[in-house]
Amino acid sequence: MLGVREALRRRGLADTAASLTVVVNTGDDLWLSGVRLQPDVDSITYALAGVNDTQRGWGRAGDSERVNAELQEWGAGWPWFTLGDLDLGTHLARTGWLREGLTPSDVLEKMSHRWDLGARLLPMTDSEVDTWVELEGGVRQHFQEWWTRHRATLAPVAFHNPGIASAVPAPGVAEAIANADIVLLAPSNPVVSIGPILAVPGIREALVATRARVVGVSPVIGGKVVRGMADVCLAAIGVDTSAAAVAEHYGARNAGGLLDAWLMAEEDAADASRVAERGIRSLVTPLWMTDADTSAALGEAALAAAGV
């Protein structure tokens, strides 16, 4: 499963699958105040552990911000990027392990032992390939500054992951894809969440070659993105904000793309034939994950789309 923060927010797919491996985006990682942050890794870990802050959409539930306030008093970090105290504990532990010579894969395995996550988590790569946003005039910002501080209001020209061309999939990623019964492209941002994973040399090739059925879930419902500012990202790469357009962006596996099947919301049923004409099996089903039951139903729909 690739880029799964949204798909796993309420554990629906973790409860549905007998054995689940999650390949996590690390393209929005960063160094801040001397510690290594991995926002997607942490969000997925906290969500599967049931300790995530569902109100804010990030961080730990019931967290405090005393250390963050002290950092601001020292003029350290970013005043618009809040770090919770419990969250900082995670970052400090990770940074210490990295300084001791562990890889991000090693660190994520250690983190996974704290809670019963119901899934095996793998970073997409052990290389540092942070995302940078190119704006007009050649100006570049780290993705987190563009996303969190400016809320994607600055028009992007392109997105870059320096060093990704020489990166390799983290240990176990290619094997997990090759040996899977079903691969799910979750409804995360196609550009800055799924995109960096697919840009790691070897991962796209593994998806094309796998014997498993590759099923995607639309991140667009009724012409609007489910969460965040993914529409701005899609516009930057010339993709319309529609379920059909995103499916076409991924492409049909029988035509050199990635998808065997595509889950679309009922609000987008009129475009199902357009997706099918591209050689992708389309399945119209409710996509809003509002509780455990609807999340589990989505997991069942994904299995049905794959013929499992």
Image: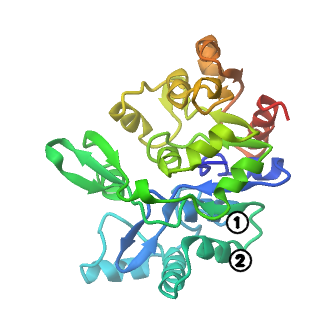
Image location (x, y in percent) of residue 2: 62, 48
Question: Of helix, strand and loop, which one carries label 1?
Answer: helix
Residue furthest to the left in view is: 137
Residue 104 occupies quadrant: bottom right
x, y percentage for residue 177?
70, 49
Point out the image quarter for the C terminus.
top right
Contact, mark 2 vs mark 1 (Cβ under 8 Å): yes
Specify the label residue 289 is tagged with: none
The residue to which callout 2 is attached is 114
Secondary structure beneath dot 2 equals: loop
Tell me which residue sits at (50%, 81%) in the image.
98
Is any part of residue 73 visible from this angle?
yes
Q: Which colour style is shown?
A: rainbow
Rendered position, 273 above or below 5: above
**Callout 2 crowding tier (Cα within 10 Å): few <14, some 14–19, many ≥20:** few
Check the image and name the residue furthest to the bottom: 100
Q: Is residue 132 above or below residue 274?
A: below
Distance from the alpha carbon under mark 2 to that under mark 1: 9 Å
Front residue (pair 201, 271): 201
2 or 1: mark nearer the eye: 2
Please name the amino acid that badge 2 sits on.
Arg
What is the x, y in percent for residue 36? 44, 74
At horizontal 63% and vertical 65% (from top left) the residue drawn is 171
Disc 1 residue type? Ala
| Above/below status of 202 relative to 212 | below
Q: Is residue 185 visible?
A: no
Category of crowding for the residue at label 1, using alpha-carbon neighbours closer than 10 angstroms: few (below 14), some (14–19), many (at least 20): some
For the image, the number of numbered tags is 2
- Give residue 49's mark: 1
